Image (cartoon, coloured by chain):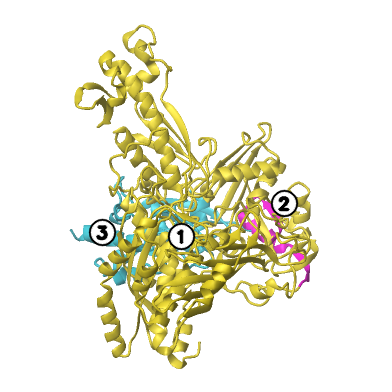
């Protein structure tokens, strides 16, 4: 199958990947760029483990081909902490035990950041609704909700 | 061996040390591993549930660029025998890839090895298989009768029968003599003869799909010339994996290293060693190259073991005052097409839990395990205990409704009383300790039970569909054999400990470093916990059955205690004659080893550690000068509890069903859990929350549904409803503490508790909500359509 070169910006760096036209964005990130923090948890776009930002908006990276993000800015979980300092949402997940096995966590953190970007002070119901595109099998979600609340408080303060 | 001293920091809410890597995307899961020259596998799977393989055409697949080889089941069987299991009962042969007959949709029939994952998948899709279909068995009752087919006609089962779908038959309870194999029914018959009221109900604990968020995966790397095999596997028990790989491949345990890297959840389904794992090992060895296989989610739905799926015909004999006289149960477990590692064992745990928390004087149970044309079952969080407790707790609730008694008071009346422990139930388990009334009282208080009743009645008066439910569970933990640990204090005073348990989300690095930190009086950040690598951990039995703190934690502390004792000897030696006489009075506090009561006589932890390796010589320039026993601070321990532990708890829920949509909302869930001593409350709460979510998922959402052709209709996250954040309430947790006499710290285990209690609690609440419509029982999952139909027309 023919190969296509795609130019994109990932976590602030300009990168080129050479992929088949059918290569999913998540596979390009993981296999070509070695950014394995973004996980694959299903094949029907239900679980959200692969959530990344495309131009600042959360997207399930298994729903896009790499060729669709030509010229776009991608942020993955590896690009969330700045200069060694955790993002408040990452800090919240640590403080509030918002993860167990950690597999859904990168996607869950990206979805939580997106949620707070659009609604900085969500109610608990808004957090639960806002994260319903992401599955976690370990936590029962309560500590994830607490983590988002922690981050919301921290950003407000 | 003296018992370890209770360390400091027990009960402290300590943040997890695992998290910094995981929240930054820096964990290494199996799929993140890439080796030079690595090939990728994909499996061609059967799309029918039962049939003979007539032909397999692999030519198109083999012609594809990048395809290294294609192997059918028959070709693989030339160098890979049937897979081992760990249960002692007769079982049919089970090849990693089907050789001549397929028995469930999704069973592998061929494997492709290619240079790229996409190519491997394309090639697998290009394989053409012709089947001669056979009749399909999906209904467990019909399976029991051998209708319409027998899956394994050559198997002679435990009853000596051939040509039967019965894989196992196990009677249990009062009057059953397991040695003689005889059953005396006089006690249970008398109980029913004397009954003033009898409850009888058929109920189904439905089949579930475990769905760890990380599907399974394996990388196998045979190194020719070295003749060693290294395997990275998403497993709960790397040592068992190593042992079974060795057995099937004819290798020594010194030649095989299994590494469980970061593992993205397991829930019992990653206890098993699967066909794909064996094939990866065998193919890597044959090709002399590393081979990777990563399961797709769609594959996981059919290729990873399922859980539950037991139907019970339950009868309870009681007096009008609520005294339970007897319990009679016939269980049929639909175990699917083959027996995996512990398949046959799991439903027998149901048999053992049928007394619940109640002093039931006569119990008779009969368990049939039957083959059907479905994915094999095996452990899923709770593994046999949720099924048993569900049946008992539904039955108790039906009895309370029949008698018009408060469900809490009926339970209280029949509890095993605190002074009766250790208590041997008629179901055959000896419970170690318990105080059920205390947990009930706390649950009633925290939930404001009487207030909730008033709230429910007021809501009903407004025409709302509201119900209250309660459940009381007990479970068995600490099973799974011994556990191993080692502790080494290095010359720089840092500590490495190894554990044979193998976490996949449970936070053992945090919990075990906390234990050692308290034991040695040094900060936890100077301690590394090593797990999940058979080359670094000498022995282990993995993480399953809520055993890790009970067995693994105790083993760690016992190994630590030995090293601590040796370290005290070094310290006493260093301190001279006065202190040496009191070596056993040295205490380990705040980085010092010092005489209790005279802290000025002491050495720093680092000084003693350095001395243990370098002796006085290196410091003083003359002689090595060790005390008797020589250099070094390292030791190990095997440990197994003297008996199983039995955590318990009481859950209370309030639910409301939307009249217009049938959707059920959990308005309140109070969970009291007693797991004995709690080491880290943060982690224990996390375990309970996750268990509650899975238990509620079973009650309301989840179910592996097969059609009559044996096709899994709920084969993706589009059709199989997993609990999402918006489906769940904020859980209200609390605890009582009844220590176990079998563990030095009094711990009991918590991993599965929430899953066991929440399911019957929610169903009991839903039945209460719908009782005005004449409902006395509902089978799970309580989907909106089912509830809506009841509310609209009363027809179930």
Q: Chain of mark 1?
A: A
Closer to the eye: label 3 or 1: 3
> Seen in the image, is B622 located left or right of residue B642?
left
Q: Residue B155's x, y, as percent?
A: 75, 60
Would you place residue A130 above or below residue B218 in this image?
A: below
Quadrant of the image containing the N terminus of chain A: bottom right
Image chain in cyan: A
**Is residue A19 toward the left or the right of residue B288 in the image?**
left
Secondary structure beneath dot 1 equals: loop
Using the rendered image, report if marks 2 and 1 lie on a common chain: no
Image quadrant where residue B55 sits? bottom right
- Graded by Cα atoms within 10 Å as few (under 14), some (14 to 19) or many (20 or more), the crowding at tag 2 reads some
Which chain wears yellow? Answer: B
User: In this picture, which residue range is highlighted in magenta?
Assistant: B108-134
- Chain letter belonging to callout 2: B
Say above or below: B254 vs A71.
Answer: above
Query: Observer-nearest residue: B443 or B70?
Result: B443
**Residue bearing mark 2:** B82
Label 1: how many residues lie within 10 Å, few (<14), some (14-19) or many (20+)?
many
Residue occupying the far top of the picture:
B622
Query: Which of B400/B81 is in front?
Result: B400
Q: What residue sits right under mark 3 in the picture?
A: A150
Residue located 28% across and 21% down the image:
B582
In the image, farthest residue toward the right = B54
| Residue B603 seen in this snapshot | yes
Q: Is residue B128 magenta?
A: yes
């Amino acid at each position: 199958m023919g190969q296509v070169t795609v130019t994109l910006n990932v976590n602030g760096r300009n990168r080129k990947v050479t992929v088949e036209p059918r290569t999913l964005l998540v596979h390009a990130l993981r296999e070509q760029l070695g950014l394995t923090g973004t996980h694959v948890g299903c094949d029907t776009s239900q679980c959200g483990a692969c959530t990344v930002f495309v131009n600042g908006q959360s997207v399930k990276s298994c729903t896009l081909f790499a060729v669709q993000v030509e010229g776009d800015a991608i942020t993955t979980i590896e690009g969330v902490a700045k200069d060694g300092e955790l993002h408040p949402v990452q800090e919240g997940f640590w403080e509030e035990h918002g993860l167990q096995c950690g597999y859904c966590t990168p996607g869950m953190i990206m979805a939580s950041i997106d949620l707070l970007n659009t609604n900085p002070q969500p109610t608990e119901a808004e957090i639960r609704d806002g994260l319903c595109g992401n599955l976690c099998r370990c936590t029962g979600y309560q500590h994830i909700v607490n983590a988002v609340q922690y981050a919301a408080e921290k950003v407000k303060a | 061996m003296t018992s370890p001293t209770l360390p400091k920091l027990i009960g402290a809410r300590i943040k997890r040390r695992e998290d910094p890597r995981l929240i930054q995307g820096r964990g290494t899961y199996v799929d993140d591993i890439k080796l030079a020259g690595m090939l990728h596998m994909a499996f061609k799977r059967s799309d029918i549930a039962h049939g003979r393989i007539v032909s397999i055409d692999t030519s198109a697949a083999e012609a594809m660029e990048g395809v290294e080889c294609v192997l059918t089941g028959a070709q693989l069987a030339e160098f890979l025998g049937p897979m081992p299991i760990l249960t002692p009962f007769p079982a049919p042969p089970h090849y990693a890839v089907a050789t001549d007959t397929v028995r469930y949709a999704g069973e592998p029939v061929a494997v492709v090895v290619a240079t790229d994952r996409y190519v491997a998948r394309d090639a697998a899709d290009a394989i053409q298989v012709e089947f001669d279909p056979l009749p399909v068995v999906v209904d467990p009752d019909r399976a029991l009768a051998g209708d319409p087919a027998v899956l394994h006609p050559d198997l002679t089962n435990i009853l000596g029968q051939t040509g039967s779908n019965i894989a196992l038959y196990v009677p249990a309870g009062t009057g059953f003599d397991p040695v003689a194999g005889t059953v005396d029914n006089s006690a249970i018959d008398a109980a029913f003869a004397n009954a003033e009221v009898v409850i009888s109900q058929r109920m189904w604990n439905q089949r579930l799909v475990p769905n760890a968020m990380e599907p399974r995966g394996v990388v196998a790397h045979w190194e020719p010339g070295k003749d060693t095999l290294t395997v990275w596997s998403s497993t709960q028990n790397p040592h068992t994996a190593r042992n079974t790989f060795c057995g099937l491949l004819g290798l020594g345990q010194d030649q095989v290293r299994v590494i469980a890297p970061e593992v993205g959840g397991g829930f019992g389904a990653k206890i098993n060693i699967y066909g794909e794992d064996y094939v990866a090992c065998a193919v890597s060895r044959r090709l002399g190259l590393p081979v990777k296989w990563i399961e797709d989610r769609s594959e996981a739905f059919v290729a990873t073991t399922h859980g539950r799926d037991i139907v019970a015909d339950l009868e309870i004999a009681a007096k009008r005052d609520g005294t339970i006289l007897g319990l009679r149960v016939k269980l049929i477990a639909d175990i699917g097409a083959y027996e995996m590692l512990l398949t046959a064992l799991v439903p027998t745990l149901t048999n053992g839990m049928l007394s619940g928390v109640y002093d039931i004087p006569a119990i008779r149970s009969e368990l049939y395990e039957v083959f059907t044309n479905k994915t094999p079952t095996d452990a899923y969080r709770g593994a046999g205990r949720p099924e048993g407790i569900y049946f008992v707790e539904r039955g108790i609730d039906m009895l309370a409704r029949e008698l018009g008694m408060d469900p809490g008071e009926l339970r209280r009346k029949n509890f095993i009383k605190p002074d009766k422990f250790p208590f041997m139930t008629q179901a055959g388990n000896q419970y170690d300790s318990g105080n059920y009334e205390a947990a009930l009282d706390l649950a009633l208080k925290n939930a404001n039970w009487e207030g909730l009743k008033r709230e429910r009645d007021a809501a009903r008066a407004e025409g709302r569909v509201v119900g209250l439910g309660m459940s009381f569970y007990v479970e068995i933990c600490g099973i799974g054999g011994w556990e191993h640990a080692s502790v080494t204090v290095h010359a720089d005073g840092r500590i490495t400990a190894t554990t044979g348990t193998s976490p996949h989300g449970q936070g053992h690095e945090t919990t075990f470093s906390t234990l050692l930190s308290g034991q040695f009086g040094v900060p936890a950040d100077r301690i590394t916990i090593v797990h999940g690598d058979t080359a670094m951990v000498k022995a282990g039995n993995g993480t399953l059955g809520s055993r890790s703190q009970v067995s693994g934690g105790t083993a760690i502390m016992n190994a630590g205690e030995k090293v601590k004792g040796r370290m005290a000897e070094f310290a006493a030696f260093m301190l001279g004659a006065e202190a040496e006489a009191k070596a056993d009075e040295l205490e380990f506090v705040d980085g010092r080893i010092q005489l209790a009561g005279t802290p000025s006589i002491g050495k720093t932890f680092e000084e003693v550690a350095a001395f243990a390796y370098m002796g006085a010589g290196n410091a003083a320039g003359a002689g090595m000068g060790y005390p008797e026993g020589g250099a070094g601070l390292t030791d190990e321990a095997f440990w197994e509890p003297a008996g199983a532990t039995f955590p318990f708890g009481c859950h209370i829920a309030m639910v409301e069903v939307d009249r217009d949509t049938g959707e059920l909302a959990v308005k309140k869930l109070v969970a009291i859990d007693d797991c004995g001593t709690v080491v880290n409350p943060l982690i224990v709460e996390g375990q309970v929350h996750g268990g509650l979510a899975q238990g509620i998922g079973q009650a309301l959402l989840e179910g592996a549904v097969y059609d009559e052709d044996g096709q899994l209709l709920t084969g993706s996250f589009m059709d199989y409803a997993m609990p999402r954040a918006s489906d769940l309430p904020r859980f209200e947790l609390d605890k009582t503490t009844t220590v176990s006499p079998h563990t030095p710290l009094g711990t009991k285990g918590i991993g599965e508790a929430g899953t066991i209690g929440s399911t019957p609690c929610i169903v009991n609440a839903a039945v209460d909500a719908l009782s005005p419509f004449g409902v006395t029982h509902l089978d799970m999952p309580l989907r909106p359509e089912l509830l809506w139909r009841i509310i609209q027309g009363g027809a179930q």
